[in-house]
Amino acid sequence: MELKVHSYESMGTYDGPGLRLVVFLQGCPFKCLYCANPDTIPAEGGTVTHPEEILKMALSQKPFFGKKGGVTFSGGEPTVQAEALVPLVRELHENGINVCIDTNGGIWNRHVEELFSIADLTLLDVKQFNPARHLELTGRPNTQTLATAAWLEENQRPFWLRYVLVPGISDAEEDIRQLGEHFGKGRYRMIRRVEILPYHTLGKNKYDSLGLEYRLKDTPLNTKEQLERAKSLFDEYFDCAVLN
Ligand code: SF4
């Protein structure tokens, strides 16, 4: 079964531990206002790719992965293509390659469940804990994302929780405290790291070239104080929070 690939990044240091080959897959059911890759959202597009090609690429880069690195499937939303990913992840494992899945956790079916059960690490983006503000930000409820986190915890699958801090959209103390009460203070023992990701506008130019409106054009970048305040709030609930 083939995969629709948007692009690749070699030697990535941002999406998972160590040096990684990051495979950005096409298609995502969310429509985040700040999405840096809006061209990965439509299901149409991307390059139809045989999984063996990705395996070959990973094997050629394996010497650089070291002990911690490997392959990360990102997007778009990689679980859209879970059925095709499962056998590829198994092959990567047979070749001693670590696999991370970078996901919004918003899709669930038996293939997604299998994918999460074999991934070495899941990078779970929680865009907002508040249901109404999540809907506003992504166009979708956060119910499944929270259910996915609960499944990872129950099934003892390690994960990183990632949170993009957008001024005026996801940086309210009340929302962060609710997230902390839900996941923190030792309640989720499978959370290995909490990453606070500053808001950036790197994808902004893509919106112009795609003829789309960038709806956060008036949203400023985080100040140093905002980032530090958020970090100390997260620190009240987690002992593994980092500012990225
Ligand atoms: S989940 Fe990721 S790829 Fe999908 S719209 Fe949001 S930021 Fe973009």
Image (cartoon, rainbow, N blue to C red):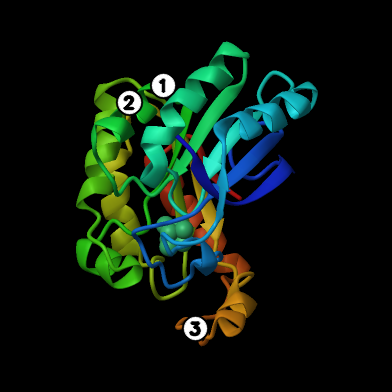
Q: Residue at 44% of width from left, 44% of height from top? A: 78
Which residue bears the numbered disc 3?
Answer: 212
Q: Residue at 64% of width from left, 79% of height from top? A: 205
Give me the disc on residue 118.
Answer: 1
Q: Position of residue 161 (x, y in %)?
A: 43, 42
Q: Residue at 52% of width from left, 32% of height from top? A: 100
Q: Position of residue 165 (x, y in %)?
A: 47, 62
Which residue bears the numbered disc 2?
Answer: 114
User: Could you tell which of marks 2 and 3 lies nearer the N-terminus?
Assistant: 2
Drawn side of residue 31 relative to residue 240, left or right? left
Query: Where is the N terminus found, in terms of image quarters?
Result: top left
Residue 230 visible in rendering: yes
Ligand 1 sits in which quadrant?
Answer: bottom left
Question: 51 or 207, which is in the foreground?
Answer: 51
Q: Secondary structure at mark 1?
A: helix
Establish if 34 lies above or below 81.
below
**How far apart are the two marked residues, 1 and 2, measured between alpha carbons?**
6 Å
Question: 39 or 84, which is in the foreground?
Answer: 84
Establish if 217 lies above or below 112.
below
Residues marked 1 and 2 touching at CB (< 8 Å):
yes
Q: Amino acid at mark 1?
A: Ile
Establish if 101 lies above or below 223.
above
Q: Position of residue 218 (x, y in %)?
A: 51, 87
Residues marked 2 and 3 touching at CB (< 8 Å):
no
Give me the disc on residue 174.
Answer: none
Residue 236 visible in rendering: no
Q: Position of residue 87 (x, y in %)?
A: 45, 24
